[in-house]
Image (spheres, rainbow, N blue to C red):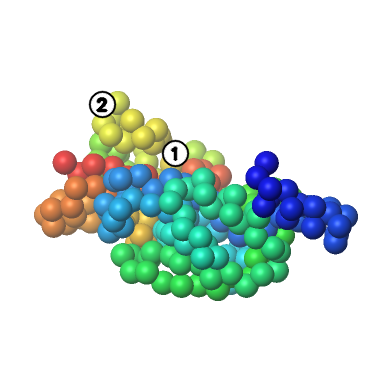
């Protein structure tokens, strides 16, 4: 253990008789080269926010899914694994400046860091955007069979009411989507950080991205239970 970390632990034990670790209340994932290119981040760096805990400190600070944290309390976040360590070692209750990249623009947020008391508190992650539910329409894009969410499809795939977007009903075995482990029952909630409400709308956006010369698209994909993650798929 580095001496700096050991001294911080000793100070907490002396003051509180226990170790208190900082808590941001976010779910994160790695910024791959594909995701970085789609989100206009050069070079690829930081921690991508895939979900926000409704009861965590990040939400009132204005941090949102799709943001990429590149600096926390003056320390650069070069890759995803840097963030949890730095957050945990930051004093609970401290007002921390967080630098994010949102839709290609750098912004700064101030977060009053919470305390990590129970990892179960981080499970309440829900996508914020609402889709528009229409009658079932099946479309095909990116090697995916897509359908509008209906009550019948929700029941069939055990999809919770809080999950909004476009349902994946099939995946081509030889597609990039299959390689990224997308599967029937998952829901696409956003395309390029914008909510999507119907299969037809999603298909139109993909076609437009291709016409605009984009190499990849970033999708916010949600499991039936509401567990979100960002997936980048090639448009080539």
Image position of 95 (left or right of 181): right
- Residue toward you, 22 or 134: 22
Compared with residue 130, is residue 229 higher up or lower down, i.e. above or below? above
Question: How crowded is the residue under tag 2: few (<14 C-alpha within 10 Å), some, or many (20+)?
Answer: few
Q: Earlier in the sequence, mark 2 or mark 1?
A: 2
**Residue, disc 1:** 185
Whether residue 203 is visible here, answered yes or no, is no
Quarter that holds the C terminus: top left
Q: Residue at x 31, y 36 (%)?
A: 177
Query: Which quarter of the figure has residue 182?
Result: top left
Left or right placement of residue 88 versus residue 220 in this view: right
Expressed as whole percent of the image width and height from the top left, the position of residue 72 reads 52, 62
Q: In the image as oriented, which residue stretches furthest toward the top?
A: 173
| Residue found at x 73% / y 55% | 8
Crowd around label 1: few <14 · some 14–19 · many ≥20 (10 Å): many
Count the marks: how many? Answer: 2
- Eye-nearest disc, 2 or 1: 2
Whole-percent x and y of residue 5?
A: 68, 50
Comparing 29 with 22, the one in front is 22
For the point 46% across and 58% down, the residue is 76
Give the spatial CA distance, label 2 vs label 1: 19 Å
* 71 horizontally vs 173: left or right: right
Q: From the viewer's perspective, is residue 226 above or below residue 172? A: below
Q: Where the N terminus falls, by quadrant? A: top right
Look at the numbered disc 1 and give the secondary structure of its residue. Answer: loop
| Residue at 29% across, 56% down | 42
Q: Position of residue 36 (x, y in %)?
A: 31, 52
Front in this rendered view, residue 151 or 1: 1
Q: Which residue is mark 2?
A: 174
Secondary structure type for disc 2: loop
């Amino acid at each position: 253990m580095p001496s700096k970390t050991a001294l911080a632990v000793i100070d907490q034990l002396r003051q509180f008789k226990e170790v208190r670790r900082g808590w941001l209340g976010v779910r994160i994932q790695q910024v791959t080269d594909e995701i970085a290119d789609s989100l206009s981040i050069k070079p690829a760096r930081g921690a991508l926010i895939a979900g926000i805990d409704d009861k965590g400190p990040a939400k009132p600070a204005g941090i949102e899914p799709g943001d990429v944290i590149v600096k926390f309390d003056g320390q650069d976040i070069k890759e995803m694994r840097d963030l949890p360590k730095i957050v945990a070692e930051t004093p609970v209750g401290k007002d921390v400046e967080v630098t994010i990249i949102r839709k290609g623009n750098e912004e700064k947020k101030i977060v009053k860091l919470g305390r990590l008391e129970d990892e179960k508190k981080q499970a309440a992650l829900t996508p914020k955007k609402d889709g528009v539910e229409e009658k079932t329409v099946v479309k095909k894009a990116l090697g995916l069979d897509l359908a509008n969410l209906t009550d019948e499809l929700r029941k069939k795939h055990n999809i919770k009411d809080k999950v909004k977007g476009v349902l994946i009903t099939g995946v081509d075995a030889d597609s990039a989507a299959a390689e990224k482990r997308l599967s029937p029952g998952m829901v696409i909630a956003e395309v390029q950080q914008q909510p999507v409400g119907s299969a037809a709308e999603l298909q139109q956006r993909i076609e437009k991205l291709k016409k605009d010369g984009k190499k990849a698209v970033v999708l916010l994909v949600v499991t039936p239970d509401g567990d979100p993650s960002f997936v980048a798929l090639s448009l080539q």
